[in-house]
């Protein structure tokens, strides 16, 4: 166990990496008009660069985790961050739309594997009984990015050209590499960890059920959040200038929910996931029913982000619990599942809006997804109890 100062600095290095990843993931949304003009395409077409990043996460998380299963974790984190820097430099240099899509795909590939391996390193460095808090601290990079990194990079891109935002992210990646080299201790790789063993350990019912809870249940929040801007203007009746306030509320919600998740995890991971799923469903119904009033709309939007933080951290820990020898693959695949949820929620929300059911309809769809996610969680809990009885017998 490294001394506390060393562990703290190592955790800061991991959080800075998460901050850089969170910034590049979401800054594209605020710069779409500038990017579209820069590569001479329409705004909807430029929006495919967001999908390209998400596809990179879904493909890269399991692929890079499997290929890196035999690497020491410090060296794997450094390699993933190098790939992240290359993807963002490629984005900043993109001469045309095709190059942009490829660069965003490459930038997304290290996302899930980085957070997965960072969570494993955080647990290695944590004191006994504090795994939940350790993982929640690493995950703080994303809500901090939503509060500070994304607005700052968006301002930079709007005032100094959209490419400057991605140069900033690339520099953050280089800073992360320096911090990883300096402060993350070398942790010998598990000699029993092989690609074959990772794949075998990953192919279990509990891993599959936990990933499904994330891919379906977490989609509820994205169904609502993907269309928050027109909901604020058309349903709540506020000016477009109020949208950033809602986004700030969501960022603050993440800052509240993520550390809270760590504390709840040390009480019970499974109960925390249950609270997240059921709470998200109830919250989305409340949002749909009260979105016409701004105080309730902003409160329930804030609360959705708190519940999302609880879900992300505890799903990560649950996968680490049930994965056996497939620790790296399972930890990374959580983020592939969450990005699948992102795509699923946004797609289903778009369908109900296109059919004329209004901007609160995605929240009802989201509530349905939360119910389905809770149903899958119920199957997982049932198997968990059956396995416990078998082990006891």
Image (cartoon, rainbow, N blue to C red):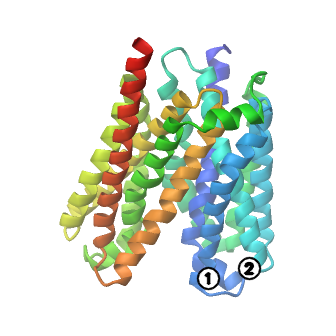
Residue at image position (59%, 25%) is 123
- The N terminus appears in which quarter of the rendering? top right
Measured from the top left, where is residue 327 in percent x and y?
A: 63, 31
Position of residue 70 in the picture relative to residue 382 (left or right)? right
Residue 323 higher or lower than 217, as above or below = above
**Closer to us: 334 or 175:** 334
User: Is residue 312 in sight in this rendering?
Assistant: yes
Question: Which quadrant is home to the C terminus?
Answer: top left
Proximity of marks 2 and 1: CB atoms separated by less than 8 Å: yes
Whether residue 383 sits left or right of residue 153 in the image: it is left
Give the vertical position of 191 relative to 102 (above or below).
above
Q: Quadrant of residue 190?
A: top right
Q: Secondary structure at mark 1?
A: helix
Mark linked to residue 45? 1
353 to the left or right of 189: left
Q: Residue sitting at 80 percent across and 57 percent down?
A: 86
Q: Earlier in the sequence, mark 2 or mark 1?
A: 1
User: What is the CA distance from the residue labelled 2 to the residue labelled 1?
Assistant: 9 Å
Q: Nearer the viewer, residue 249 or 39?
A: 39
How many discs mark residues in the rendered view? 2
Instruction: Decide: few, some or many residues near mark 1? Use Cα within 10 Å; few <14, some 14-19, many ≥20.
Output: few
Front residue of 309 and 35: 309
Give the residue pinned by disc 2: 97
Residue at image coords 44%, 16%: 391
Mark seen at residue 198? none
In the image, residue 165 lies at what x, y percent?
67, 64
SS class of the residue under badge 2?
helix
x then y, percent, for residue 140: 52, 41
């Amino acid at each position: 166990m490294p001394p506390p100062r060393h562990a703290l600095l190592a955790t800061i290095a991991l959080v800075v990496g998460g901050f850089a990843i969170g910034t590049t993931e979401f800054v594209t949304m605020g710069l779409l008009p500038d990017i579209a003009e820069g590569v001479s395409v329409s705004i909807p077409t430029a929006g495919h660069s967001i999908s390209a990043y998400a596809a990179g996460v879904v493909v890269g998380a399991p692929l890079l985790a499997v290929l890196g299963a035999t690497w020491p974790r410090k060296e794997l984190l450094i390699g993933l961050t190098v790939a992240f820097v290359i993807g963002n430099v490629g984005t900043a240099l993109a001469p045309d739309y095709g190059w942009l899509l490829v660069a965003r795909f490459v930038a997304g590939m290290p996302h899930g594997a980085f957070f997965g391996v960072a969570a494993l390193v955080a647990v290695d460095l944590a004191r006994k009984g504090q795994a939940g808090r350790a993982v929640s601290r690493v995950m703080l990079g994303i809500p901090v990015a939503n509060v500070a990194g994304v607005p700052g990079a968006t301002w930079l891109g709007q005032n100094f050209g959209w490419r400057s935002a991605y140069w900033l992210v690339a520099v953050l990646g280089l800073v992360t590499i320096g911090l990883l080299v300096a402060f993350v201790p070398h942790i010998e790789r598990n000699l029993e960890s092989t690609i074959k063993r990772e794949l075998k350990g990953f192919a279990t019912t509990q891993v599959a059920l936990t990933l499904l809870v994330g891919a379906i249940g977490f989609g509820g929040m994205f169904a609502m959040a993907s269309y928050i801007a027109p909901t604020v203007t058309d349903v709540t009746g506020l000016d477009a200038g109020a949208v950033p306030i809602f986004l700030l509320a969501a960022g603050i919600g993440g800052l509240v929910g993520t550390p809270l998740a760590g504390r709840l995890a040390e009480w019970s991971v499974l109960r925390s996931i249950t609270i997240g799923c059921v709470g998200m469903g109830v919250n989305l119904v409340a949002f749909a029913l009260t979105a016409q009033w701004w105080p309730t709309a902003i409160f329930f939007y804030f609360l959705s982000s708190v519940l999302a933080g609880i879900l992300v951290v505890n799903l990560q820990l649950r996968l680490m619990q049930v994965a056996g020898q497939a620790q790296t693959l399972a930890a990374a695949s959580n983020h592939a599942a969450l990005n699948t949820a992102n795509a699923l929620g946004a797609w289903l929300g778009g369908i109900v809006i296109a059919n004329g059911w209004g901007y609160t309809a995605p929240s009802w769809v989201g509530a349905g997804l939360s119910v389905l996610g809770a149903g899958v969680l119920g199957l997982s809990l049932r198997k968990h109890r059956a396995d416990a009885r078998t082990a006891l017998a």
